Amino acid sequence: MSEREQTLSEFRHFREKMNEAILNAGHLGIKRFFTLDARTYEAGALDAKTKELLGLVASMVLRCDDCITYHVVRCREEGVTDDEFYDACSVALVFGGSIVIPHLRRAVARLQEVPAT
Amino acid sequence: MSEREQTLSEFRHFREKMNEAILNAGHLGIKRFFTLDARTYEAGALDAKTKELLGLVASMVLRCDDCITYHVVRCREEGVTDDEFYDACSVALVFGGSIVIPHLRRAVARLQEVPAT
Amino acid sequence: MSEREQTLSEFRHFREKMNEAILNAGHLGIKRFFTLDARTYEAGALDAKTKELLGLVASMVLRCDDCITYHVVRCREEGVTDDEFYDACSVALVFGGSIVIPHLRRAVARLQEVPAT
Amino acid sequence: MSEREQTLSEFRHFREKMNEAILNAGHLGIKRFFTLDARTYEAGALDAKTKELLGLVASMVLRCDDCITYHVVRCREEGVTDDEFYDACSVALVFGGSIVIPHLRRAVARLQEVPAT
Amino acid sequence: MSEREQTLSEFRHFREKMNEAILNAGHLGIKRFFTLDARTYEAGALDAKTKELLGLVASMVLRCDDCITYHVVRCREEGVTDDEFYDACSVALVFGGSIVIPHLRRAVARLQEVPAT
Amino acid sequence: MSEREQTLSEFRHFREKMNEAILNAGHLGIKRFFTLDARTYEAGALDAKTKELLGLVASMVLRCDDCITYHVVRCREEGVTDDEFYDACSVALVFGGSIVIPHLRRAVARLQEVPAT
């Protein structure tokens, strides 16, 4: 990433610290949403790898860098290869247009931080 | 679909008529985009079924009913089952929030028009 | 509404029919989201009227006509007056820009269908 | 346009009727926004034709069909040719991606309703 | 906030410096928009606190961190409690989906910087 | 720019490095999109200056700071004056609403880095 971007470690630290603050606030609806969100990517009729690719493309077309970071890491954990990653990105790019390009750059930078398993 | 929505046949008719008008206008950049768009969903590192599911989820989180109609039909052609469809929709719904619900309703109405093969 | 728009009765009929089809499909994550969504607008630290105004403004800046219809009706049920409605719309309009105007037109048309209680 | 779309005449009738209702409601902030919006497209450092092309491309990438209809008509009044229209659309298409295509179809249908002067 | 985010003081400094540059440029339409924007949140049919909550939720579903920072500070000035803040956030979260979560994290970090009065 | 923003030089360095990584990955669809994107802003029925103004306004209403930086620099190269820049921004601001303001601030900061030719 560029010098001004968060490192993966900074991203994780801030994410965990704030998730804890949010859940400790005790709002039942927000807690339920966080639980539901976590379960959404568990294998169902579709396997976990496919669902992470869906999460990655949704992150890119909606242009959320934090979501991209999260799903790039999870895609790697589910065994997504570089070629599969770029093929998914091509759908996001053509679907979402050139405005996706800056996010694609940051997605590739994250991919380089997380080697294929 | 509701009485005021386009039927699948009306959708296809308008789509083909206008695509023809657009391509006949002779703008090279627009033509190239249409060609690129068509090729994006061909099997590559990911198979065609997975790429159609990516297209479906992108359509739903970006809330484009015409895109949803197109990808529901293509998902069916690639053998997507009802359970796989709903599992993909659950990702779109949790990712995009309740604002996706009206589009989910129309997606399901389209799904009912296009039986599983 | 214009002749080509759904009437409020058509909107409700399609909404109920499709919600039933979605819930009958039996996807646990989708069901939980629908339950969570319904509970979100119940009185908590904020009263139900304020939460419906939040839903109305979110619908307008995200430009979802079905969501607008739903929250206009619910705002009326919670006693929102015409003046309060327009004051909330002014926030949505300045926040979201002129692209909100077509949705404001349809919101006002719905408001006229649902008299103040 | 397709049979289910508003005709240009229906669009104008609904637009005028609802704008009148909105302005009659007497909310000062909303009135000021409408005045400001109208003046935005008057010639300044940029001429009116260029500003209408800016409005057209903004309408397309933000995917607002009513805004597209309005700016297609205004572009024609400012002397935009078919070739200029398609060249502007190519920017919107590559910028906004394939999700712009359904709106491009409806933009071209509107263009065919409003002949070059 | 994370080490790479702007502090509240940096945010304010940059905001004031650039607002001054923008207004000094002398474009009448831009000046009028800034005036209109400031007046939008003044008490009218709705009180200032409710309007700031509307601004906060609009900021979150449109995912604008600078707007969130501004409205979190203003919410505090209008006496919004932690519980009211989280209740408003739950509407934004369910409405806008998991893509709102990264912005919710930053909103809560800002809230911690601005104690309740 | 604020101390935490990328400098223009950092932006260019990261952009070039990552574009190279993306193109070296060898995905044909992605390569074609990058080629198409570059050609989109070449003079056609509209001149290059007008097309860069279209790109600038699209960047602002879609709220992409990297795209804004790119098009501000290109606008300057095509001879766009300060007054023309602000006139284009006024369209983006009224079209996209107050949520455009934070991006307008950063656009003006970039403009100050790139003097008129």
Image: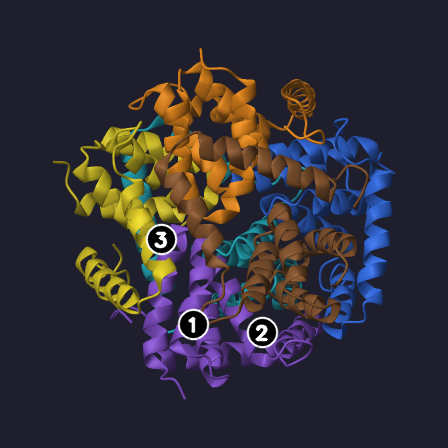
Chain colours: A blue, B cyan, C purple, D yellow, E brown, F orange
Amino acid carrying mark 1 in the image:
Phe
Q: Residue at x 19, y 38 (%)?
A: D76
Q: Splitting the image into 4 quarters, where does residue D90 fall?
A: top left
Chain to which the residue tagged by mark 1 belongs: C
| Residue at far top of view | F117
Q: Which residue is mark 2?
A: C51
Q: Quadrant of the C terminus of chain A?
A: top right
Compared across the picture, whether D28 is left or right of D7 comes to right
Badge 3 element: helix
Q: Are marks 1 and 2 in contact (CB under 8 Å)?
A: no
Q: Earlier in the sequence, mark 1 or mark 2?
A: 2
The residue positioned 51% from the left and 30% from the top of the image is: E21
Which residue bears the numbered disc 3? Answer: D33
Location of residue E86 with respect to E65 vertically, above or below: below
| Residue C85, numbered label | 1
Q: Amino acid at mark 2?
A: Lys
Q: What crowding class fits label 1: few (fewer than 14 Cα within 10 Å), some (14-19), or many (20 or more)? A: many
Q: Secondary structure beneath disc 1? A: helix
Do the residues at discs 3 and 1 belong to one chain? no
* Front position in the image: F12 or C93: C93
Q: Amino acid at mark 3?
A: Phe
Residue D39, image x, y percentages: 28, 43
Inspect this view and state whether residue C98 appears. Answer: yes
Residue at figure coordinates x 56%, y 33% from the top left? E18
Residue D57's place in the image compared with A31, above or below, is above
